Image: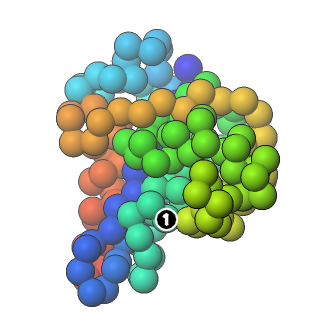
Amino acid sequence: MIVLFTDGGCHNNSTRLGAYAFVCVQIENEEAIYSTTKQGELLFGASKSQADTTNNIMELLAISKGLQECNTRGTKLDVIITDSQYVQKGITEWSANWRKNGWRNGQNQAIANKEIWKDLLDNHMQYTVKVWHVRGHEGVYWNEVCDKLCTTAMQSKV
């Protein structure tokens, strides 16, 4: 299995400094995704900090940038793993209605981060891929790697 693990984060201080990270891993089976020890082989990954942002934007960019890199390399994913329910539900549950309703939510308001969502869904989700949620900071090895990459990227800008 080819799995893209993603994470994003943002300091909640006046700087609004954030970062995203992703790692693409070849893993033997679904159970290995949730392992607390290193399972599989790291294929590639990246992280980047960004000023004046939000946590949700960084979570979205983690998947968008990860998919861009996969598409550039011709890597076809089986699963995307995120610790953001906002992103997971946005892709798997909410986006069909957003499109149908002109990118508006159930309260007829424009959805937050519309341009990032449209770019992600229209330009980078080139094939059907599963998107699963894991709880953050629960010891899932590759999710923790992404979290550390985000933290390091933010600290390098402080």
- Please state, as top left, top right, bottom left or bottom right, where the N terminus lies in the image: top right
- Please state, as top left, top right, bottom left or bottom right, where the C terminus lies in the image: bottom left
Residue in front for this viewpoint, 83 or 94? 94
Relative side of 69 to 135, left or right: right
Residue at coordinates 31% horizontally, 45% vertically from top-left? Answer: 145
Kind of residue at badge 1: Ile
Q: Quadrant of residue 56?
A: bottom left
Residue at coordinates 79% horizontally, 47% vertically from top-left? Answer: 100
* Residue 135 image position (x, y, % from top left): 29, 36
Residue lying at the far front of the rendered structure: 107
Q: Is residue 107 above or below residue 87?
A: below
Q: Is residue 128 above or below residue 85?
A: above
Under circle 1, the secondary element is: helix
Q: Quadrant of residue 71?
A: top right
Q: Is residue 11 above or below residue 158?
A: above
Residue in front for this viewpoint, 60 or 74? 60
Q: Which residue is mark 1?
A: 57
One can see residue 57 in this view = yes
